[in-house]
Amino acid sequence: MSKRNEPVRKTVKEILADLLAGHREAAFNGPVAAQKYLDRTLAGQQSLPNAVKAVAFDRLAEARAQLQDWAGVIDAVAGFLKYLPEMEAGLGHGYREALEATTALERGVQARSERGEFHEALELSDLAIGLNLGAHWSAKRDSLDWAR
């Protein structure tokens, strides 16, 4: 009998690299192509690690913001926030770098502000400050502080 080939097992970081490469290639054709790639990836990959799903939703929020699909941005940000706790466990030492590269919270603030949902934009700013994503978030929060 011949020996059965074992399936290739990729690490979370390798899967993330594949997702980012595919997204980068799709994004060359514009935000519609990027959104289509991410939608298909999220729908068709039930075994996609949750840490990678968080990054996929982050990129989806960016594509939808470029298309000014504010409701779609809000949905993508919700997906990002759902899987955000899994990023640290899944990416280990690469977590901080990956988190700092995300733009979902910025796009969420943008979408919420465009829709006049300033209280929700303020909550996202507070979350970003809690995640220590940079001093510019304090300025964003201060500009929205009147919504309290």
Image (tube, grey):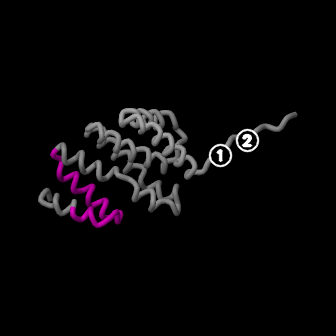
Position above or below: 8 against 144? above
Position above or below: 33 against 134? above
Q: Which residue is mark 1?
A: 9
SS label for mark 2? loop
Residue located 26% across and 63% down the image: 136
Q: Amino acid at mark 1?
A: Arg
User: What label sits on residue 31 in the rendered view?
Assistant: none
Viewport quadrant of the C terminus: bottom left
Residue located 31% across and 52% down the image: 105
Residue located 34% across and 44% down the image: 62
Residue 143 screen position, x and y as percent = 16, 60
Residue 87 screen position, x and y as percent = 47, 55
**Is residue 138 rendered to the left or right of residue 7?**
left
Q: Which residues are magenta?
A: 116-139
SS label for mark 1? loop
Label 1 environment density (alpha carbons within 10 Å; few <14, some 14–19, many ≥20):
few
Q: Is residue 42 found inside the magenta-colored segment of the image?
A: no
Viewport quadrant of the N terminus: top right
Asked whether the residues under the numbered discs 2 and 1 touch, taking CB atoms below 8 Å apart as contact, a structural biologist would say: yes
User: Residue 85 lies in what quarter of the image?
Assistant: bottom left
Asked whether 54 or 30 is in front, the reply is: 30
Farthest left residue in view: 146
Q: Amino acid at mark 2?
A: Glu
Residue located 78% across and 37% down the image: 4
**Is residue 111 rendered to the left or right of residue 6?**
left
Position above or below: 29 against 127? above
Q: Which residue is mark 2?
A: 6
